[in-house]
Image (cartoon, helix red, strand yellow):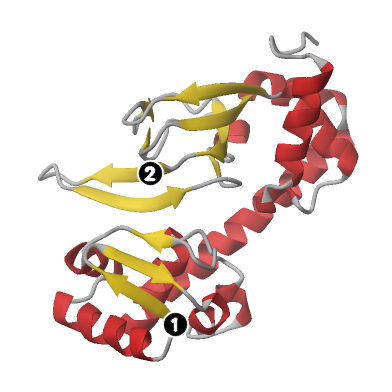
Amino acid sequence: MKRPDDSSAASAAQRLRALRAVPLLSSLSLGNIETLAYLAHERSAASGEVLFRQGDPGDTLLIVLTGELWASIFGPDGREQILRRLRAGDVVGEIALIDGRPRSADVHAVTRSRLLVLERRAVLDEVARDPAFALALLRLLCERLRATSAALEAMLFHDSGTRLAAVLLSLSGGREGAHVDLTQSELGEIAGAARETVNKKLREWEKAGLIALSPGRVVVKALSRLAALLPDDAARNAF
C-alpha cells in the first residue's frame, strides 16, 4: 500500500496522537489507530471553504484537528438548517467509508481548520486485508448509530426543554465551556420550539448556573447537569 504524501516519522506520530484523542475512536485498539494514522493524510481548509455538498460522492472521512466546521442542510425555501457543529476531535463522514453513498448534508469550514482525511479506497483495502480491523470499524459504526438513535429519540419524543437540552449538548460537542453561537429563534427552529419557550428555558437554566447567555451565544457551564435533563443514560451518552 502506498503511504500518504506526508508520511515522515514526525507527521505519522502527529497523526497518531491526534487520532488517539478522538472520542469516537476510543474503542479501537492502539494497533487499529496506528493503521488509521498510517492511512490518513492532513489538509487545511480556509474559512468559508465548502468541503463537500449534499449529494457529493461519499469517499472520505474527515477528522477535525483544529478549527470549526458546520454540517447543514437546506430546505426547499433555501433556508439553512444547522445539523451539527464540529470542533477538534469530531468526525464526519464515517458511514461513507463503508457504503460510499452520496453525502446527506453540506459541510463547510467556519474558521480556518486543519483536518485529517481518510480515503474510502485505502480503508477498504485495509478492511479486505485485515478482518480484525474490519470488525473494529463495524463496532465503531454501531456505536455511532446507537448514539444517533438515542439522540433522535430525545429530539422526537420528549418535551421542548429536553429537545433544547439535546440541541445544546449536540451543538456544543458535549464540551463544558463550549459555546453555541445561534440566536434563540435559530435554536427554536432546530429544537422545534417557539422562541418564547426557548427564551424562558434558557433564562431558567442561566439562573440555575447551567449556562451563560450573551446576544447570539449560549455557553455550556455545567455539562453534566445539562445532560441530566435528558431522559436516560442512553440518550445522555449520545453526546
User: Which corner quadrant of the image does residue 14 belong to?
Assistant: top right
Q: Is residue 59 left or right of residue 156?
A: right
Q: Residue at x 77, y 12 (%)?
A: 3
Specify the amino acid type for callout 2. Answer: Trp
- Residue 15 vs residue 189: left or right? right
Residue at mark 1: 210
Horizontal and vertical percent position of residue 97: 61, 32
Q: Residue at the spot x=41%, y=52% of the render?
A: 84
Q: Quadrant of residue 96?
A: top right
Q: Is residue 219 visible?
A: yes
112 vs 3, nearest the viewer: 112
Location of the C terminus by quadrant is bottom right
Task: Classify mark 2: helix, strand or loop.
Answer: strand
Q: Of residues 4 and 105, which is closer to you in this image?
A: 4
| In the rendered image, the vertical position of residue 216 relative to residue 134, given as above or below | below
Q: CA distance from mark 1 to mark 2?
A: 24 Å
Numbered badge on residue 228: none
* Three-letter amino acid code at the position of disc 1: Leu
Residue 127, can we see it? no
Residue 149 percent across, percent down from the top left: 52, 64
**Under tag 1, what secondary structure?**
loop
Q: Which residue is mark 2?
A: 70
Relative to 91, does residue 117 appear above or below in the rendering? above
Q: Nearer the viewer, residue 29 or 15?
A: 15
Q: Is residue 65 above or below residue 117?
A: below
**Which badge, 1 or 2, is on the more N-terminal residue?**
2
Please tell me how crowded label 2 is: few (under 14), some (14-19), or many (20+) other residues with Cα within 10 Å. many
Q: Quadrant of residue 167?
A: bottom left
Q: Residue 126 location, x and y as percent?
A: 79, 24
Q: Residue at x 21, y 66 (%)?
A: 215
Label 1: how many Cα within 10 Å (few below 14, some 14–19, many 20+)? some
